[in-house]
Amino acid sequence: MKKPTIKISDADPNQSFGGEYARFNDQPAAETKSAAGKLETNPAPAPARPSARRQKARVQEPPRSAATAVETGDKMAVRRVTLIGYPTNDQLNELEVLADQGLPLADMIRLAGRNALSSFAPKPAFSDYSDDDRARYVDAYRTSKEVPVEVLEELHRQGDPLDFKSDGAMLRGQFEPHFRQKLDDLIEDQKKKLANKT
């Protein structure tokens, strides 16, 4: 007995029923006829505008230098500047003599530097410095101080025509002599104290 066959007359031979061989519909967007009979294409929907919250989140402030403090309220704009002061070779020789008597050289330099920093007031008048009579790099005193931006800008205008030197270089001519004076005072003071003990 023959099995009945079912014939589908309207079947589409290109119709896909899934599986890895399913064909993708790569036909263009459907065209519709308007009432006037002209072909019209459906316009693509406008891209969604990001919400105000997202737009605000995308706005990023430019990176700020770590050495810069922006003016806020009544505060003056300042920059933290690295200061350096070198003892002279003569001062280093005297410090070594005092070190032999129990006064650590590094502590003497730090104490003189602390005294210099506490009384140092940067001025908008550039003073150059010289490396002719400075001691070793390892014996230099290093610290930092907040300095008004307007003072630094004036120093650069006077002493840095190419605008490439550091803020510290602009202030070294002021700070280093001040540091050396404080170091001289400390050396003389300790000499007197040692002399009184003998």
Image (cartoon, rainbow, N blue to C red):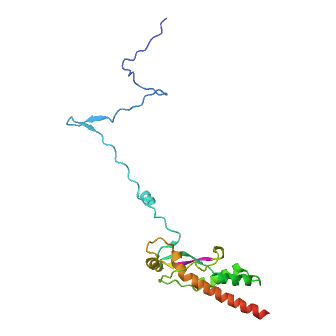
Whether residue 196 sits left or right of residue 125 in the image: it is right
Q: Residue at x 58, y 81 (%)?
A: 176
Residue, far right: 198
Q: Position of residue 38 (x, y in %)?
A: 22, 36
Whether residue 139 sits left or right of residue 167 in the image: it is right
Q: Position of residue 26 (x, y in %)?
A: 38, 32
Viewer-nearest residue: 89 or 160: 89
Viewer-nearest residue: 131 or 61: 131
Q: Residue at x 35, y 32 (%)?
A: 27
Residue 111 shows in this picture:
no
Determine the image quadrant of residue 29: top left
**What is the quadrant of the C terminus in the image?**
bottom right
Determine the image quadrant of residue 138: bottom right
Q: Position of residue 164 (x, y in %)?
A: 47, 70
Residue 107 shows in this picture:
yes
Image position of 21 with respect to 157: above or below:
above
Q: Position of residue 153 (x, y in %)?
A: 45, 77
Residue, far top: 1
Residue, far front: 132
What residue range appears in magenta? Answer: 141-146
